[in-house]
């Protein structure tokens, strides 16, 4: 009987422990440079972008750990931080679609309040949260957003002085899943005005760090064209095979489980470079194993369990959300391709339509979060496991909806 173990894989949660984080050296290095610049009074507001499920929250979490002084990951990745240790005060706000600038501003200030109380033995900050919320009830005009930004920055200016008194490195305000906030809420204008106000007031020890799906900056740009000058964009690509191997090897080694090299190759192929299915398959591989050695039989058992049981309802919902008729034909054609990135030429050949006859369908599938554009004329599934699901169970219907 196999001994009980602590699962080293976390498919449903961001990775918070530095020793469980693998890969992303270039991206971590880029964001650490933003920390270093802020440490030296040159704030670089930064946004981490990538496909949904690509690991943005995990990277943001690691950046928060580093900002608060945990340098273990940098040592393991052999990244020079430029300092022995950072000592930033961090506040975190999870964004949602019903929020607006006043909610973002008040939410992050409330988190800063709590952090100051925790770090400095109950120290109370003078922040005008009630005033910001009151202004936010007016409307979503530029004048209102400007007033919110003014009050927000006034509080941050006071906090900046407290940070200097306490000899801290600075403060970092994290906004995760920023893309969930509707662009017409005025969020881009809010960040642009806030960044400019802080710069004018010479507040050089506070910066915004955010995470959002690929295209988040472009969506914000529709509201405020100069948003590119506000945020430094750090895109997260899909994981390369060596990075997937590192994640799996690290996890397997933690529970002293050996494996055939072909197993990690199969996981990489099925996951298409997305961290979530890598962790999901890694976790299920360990559950499928009985002898502390993973082989292709264990992989096949894990794959079947993931697709047919653990993720079946989620994958079925994604397929249904795609729409019927031509939408299902497109997905069936994409699933028949041998690789993760599918060229339009293959889809055209399989479904028998010219590209201009289904371009609207492709756009809608992207909006419905079923597929994404990997490159010009090349597409992929947002959830790579949907391809395996379609090949195993088929599509829903190719009738009706166009």
Image (cartoon, helix red, strand yellow):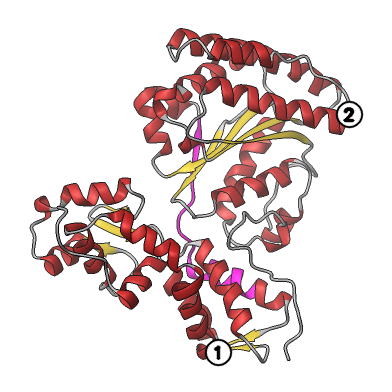
Secondary structure beneath dot 1 equals loop
In this rendering, the answer to whether 134 lies above or below 253 is above
Residue that lies at the very extreme toward the right in this rendered image:
121
In this rendering, the answer to whether 342 lies above or below 121 is below
> Is-magenta flag for residue 247?
yes
In magenta, the rendered stretch is 231-249
Q: Mark 1 sits on what residue?
A: 295
Name the spot of residue 162 as percent of width and height, x first.
81, 19
Q: Which one is earlier in the sequence, the residue at label 2 or at label 1?
A: 2
In-front residue for pair 33/20: 20
Relative horizontal placement of residue 353, taking residue 227 as reference (left or right): left
Name the spot of residue 1 as percent of width and height, x first.
73, 91
Relative horizontal placement of residue 346, taking residue 356 as reference (left or right): right
* Residue at 56% in and 20% down: 102
Q: Mark 2 sits on what residue?
A: 120
Relative horizontal placement of residue 51, taking residue 169 as reference (left or right): left
Secondary structure beneath dot 2 equals loop
* Residue at 34% in and 55% down: 370
> Is residue 385 visible in this depiction of the protein?
yes
Of the numbered discs in the image, which one, if any, rests on residue 72? none
In this rendering, the answer to whether 365 lies above or below 196 is below
In-front residue for pair 99/371: 99
> Is residue 381 visible in this depiction of the protein?
no
Name the spot of residue 20 as percent of width and height, x first.
68, 63
Q: Give the alpha-carbon distance from disc 2 to disc 1, as whole Å.
A: 53 Å
* Residue at 75% in and 19% down: 159
Q: Residues within 10 Å of mark 2 (few under 14, many from 20)?
A: few
Residues tagged 2 and 1 counted as in contact (Cβ below 8 A): no
> Is-magenta flag for residue 232?
yes
Q: Residues within 10 Å of mark 1 (few under 14, many from 20)?
A: some
């Amino acid at each position: 009987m196999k001994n009980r173990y602590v699962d080293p894989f976390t498919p449903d949660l961001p990775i918070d422990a530095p020793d469980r984080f693998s890969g992303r050296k270039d991206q971590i290095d880029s964001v650490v440079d933003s920390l270093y610049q802020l440490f030296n009074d040159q704030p670089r507001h930064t946004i981490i972008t990538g496909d949904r499920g690509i690991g943005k929250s995990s990277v943001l979490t690691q950046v928060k750990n580093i900002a608060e002084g945990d340098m273990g990951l940098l040592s393991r990745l052999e990244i020079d931080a430029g300092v022995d240790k950072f000592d930033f005060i961090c506040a975190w706000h999870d964004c949602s679609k019903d929020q607006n600038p006043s909610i973002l501003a008040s939410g992050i200030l409330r988190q800063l309040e709590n952090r100051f109380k925790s770090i400095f033995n109950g120290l109370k900050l003078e922040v005008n949260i009630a005033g910001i919320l009151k202004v936010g009830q007016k409307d979503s005009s530029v004048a209102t957003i400007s007033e919110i930004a003014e009050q927000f920055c006034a509080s941050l200016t006071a906090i900046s002085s407290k940070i200097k008194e306490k000899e801290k490195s600075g403060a970092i305000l994290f906004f995760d899943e920023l893309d969930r906030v509707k662009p017409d809420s005025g969020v881009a204008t809010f960040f642009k005005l806030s960044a400019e106000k802080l710069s004018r007031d010479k507040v050089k020890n506070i910066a915004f760090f955010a995470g959002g799906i690929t295209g988040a900056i472009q969506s914000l740009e529709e509201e405020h064209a100069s948003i590119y000058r506000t945020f430094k964009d750090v895109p997260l690509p899909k994981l390369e095979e060596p990075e997937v191997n590192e994640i799996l090897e690290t996890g397997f080694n933690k529970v002293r489980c050996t494996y055939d090299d072909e197993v990690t190759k199969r996981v990489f192929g099925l996951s298409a470079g997305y961290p979530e299915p890598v962790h999901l398959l890694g976790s299920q591989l360990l559950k499928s194993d009985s002898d502390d050695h993973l082989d292709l039989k264990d992989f096949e058992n894990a794959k079947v369990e993931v697709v047919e049981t653990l993720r079946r309802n989620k994958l079925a919902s994604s397929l249904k959300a795609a729409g019927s008729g031509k939408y299902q034909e497109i997905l069936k054609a994409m699933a028949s391709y041998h690789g993760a990135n599918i060229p339009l030429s293959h889809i055209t050949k399989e479904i028998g339509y010219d590209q201009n006859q289904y371009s609207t369908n492709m756009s809608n599938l992207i909006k419905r979060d079923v597929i994404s554009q990997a490159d010009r004329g090349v597409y992929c599934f947002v959830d790579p496991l949907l391809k395996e699901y379609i090949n195993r169970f088929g599509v829903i219907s190719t009738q009706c909806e166009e």
